[in-house]
Amino acid sequence: MTTSSELKDGMRIDWDMPVQMDDGVVLRADVFRPPGGGRYPVILGATPYGKWLSFQDEVWGGQWRMLCAHEPEILQLSSNKYQNYEFPDPERFVPEGYALVRVDVRGTGRSPGFMDLLSARETKDLYECIEWAARQPWSNGRVGLNGVSYLAMNQWQVAALQPPHLAAICVWEGCSDFYREFTRHGGIYSLFGDLWIEKYVHPVQHGRGARGWRSNINGEWVSGPQTLSEEELAARRKELGELAAESRKKEVALAAARTRQAALFAQVHETARAEERQVTALADKSERLAALLDLLEGRGRALAPGAASIRKYRGALDWPIKGPVVVPFGRIANPKFPKTFLRSSGWTLEASPGTPVHAVFSGDVVYAQWLKGYGNLVVVDHGDGVFTLYGRLATGTVGRGEHLALGDAVGLLGESPEDEPAGLYFEIRDNRTSADPAAWLR
């Protein structure tokens, strides 16, 4: 296939521009943009209905006549000859300073490949089309998606992948649950999908060529130029029944995962409630932590025979995170009340949220959950009466009962409370007594 470019109706129109995917398949896109130079925001849509099939053609003619009857002013706002079903009219948006890009999804219209509608592959294609549009010399790097129904459904999907240059989505009448909203309404099979794919999608499958429609927009074959047999076309697409079955399979797997997750959360919450009951009576956060540590240290593990003691490496341990000490150990000035002092049982190490935090020595995680005053807190038992504490972590840290090797990730640093210095709270406990980290780290 060849590309072409022309100035027509006050627009620069680039026909059949190649957009190469990461697997080598080349999709085809039309670009409508203001004439001359300049960089413009992009409105993009990916359609299974053939980008060269005009709204007024035989397939969509009934809807077009209904639209004109209900909204006759549409005939005065544009010549409508570039109208394509469910996508904005180029003649109305280009004069407002936008570049419009419409793409035939894989296996439809002018784009070759295996037709697998609303699949992960098709979503990845749309992601790459967004990034392709952002890189073009006529683009300002900001890409928005717009469209109705199918062209809205695929917006939900690709937005979840967070393409770097996707600036906005405009979703019109787009369902977000393929199984419940598209194929099984209330569990009852909907015949709409069969009608839809047979009447509106299969007639524009790529490879229909001369057995398909000739475009009223530019006179070329909408689904060409290659012409394949029905058997060849059937082998190059996934049918709706297969899509529905796959969607249901994913629904069942997701429901099972949610059930397992709920059971795990219930178990974690019950453990948390049992331990929280033993510490909630203490108002001061240092007392609350001391109570928790007394509870944990009472269960401390003995050093395994032949295992190296952390004490052997006292003064030579790596830091859990790189950053300056903004709150030292020991007696410190009270930032809220001048001429008064507080006692710090550990360090606060300054670092940005998201910074990885590492275990300073091997040990077992004996606590991994939220504690008032410390945020998400992880306590590691190194044996021989030595524990290390890592506070203000982000969610999704290690779990209780996990064994960590030296340098293993404990988690990522989270946000600090507004009334606390930003950074990691780190403490070393030696036989139930807070120890100065400076004596242990190198």
Image (cartoon, grey):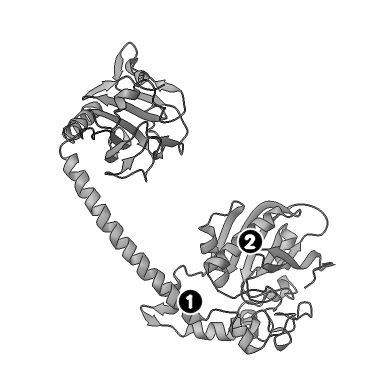
Q: Nearer the viewer, residue 426 or 126?
A: 426
Kindly identify the residue that appears in the image at 63 percent across and 85 percent down.
232
Secondary element at image label 2: loop
For this orientation, the residue located farthest to the top is 339
In the image, residue 81 lies at what x, y percent?
A: 74, 76
Kindly identify the residue that appears in the image at 74 percent across and 84 percent down.
214
Q: Earlier in the sequence, mark 2 or mark 1?
A: 2
Residue 343: quarter of image: top left
Residue 98: quarter of image: bottom right
Residue 409 relative to residue 202: left or right: left
Residue 22's disc number: 2
In the image, residue 182 lies at what x, y percent?
A: 46, 76
Question: Mark 2 and mark 1: span between their CA atoms?
Answer: 23 Å
Does 63 appear above or below 127? below
Residue 264: quarter of image: bottom left
From the image, tell me which residue sits under label 1.
243
For this orientation, the residue located farthest to the front is 306
Q: Report if residue 346 is visible in the image.
A: no
Secondary element at image label 1: helix
Q: Report if residue 245 is visible in the image.
A: yes
Instruction: Please name the amino acid that badge 2 sits on.
Output: Asp
Residue 427 relative to residue 287: left or right: right
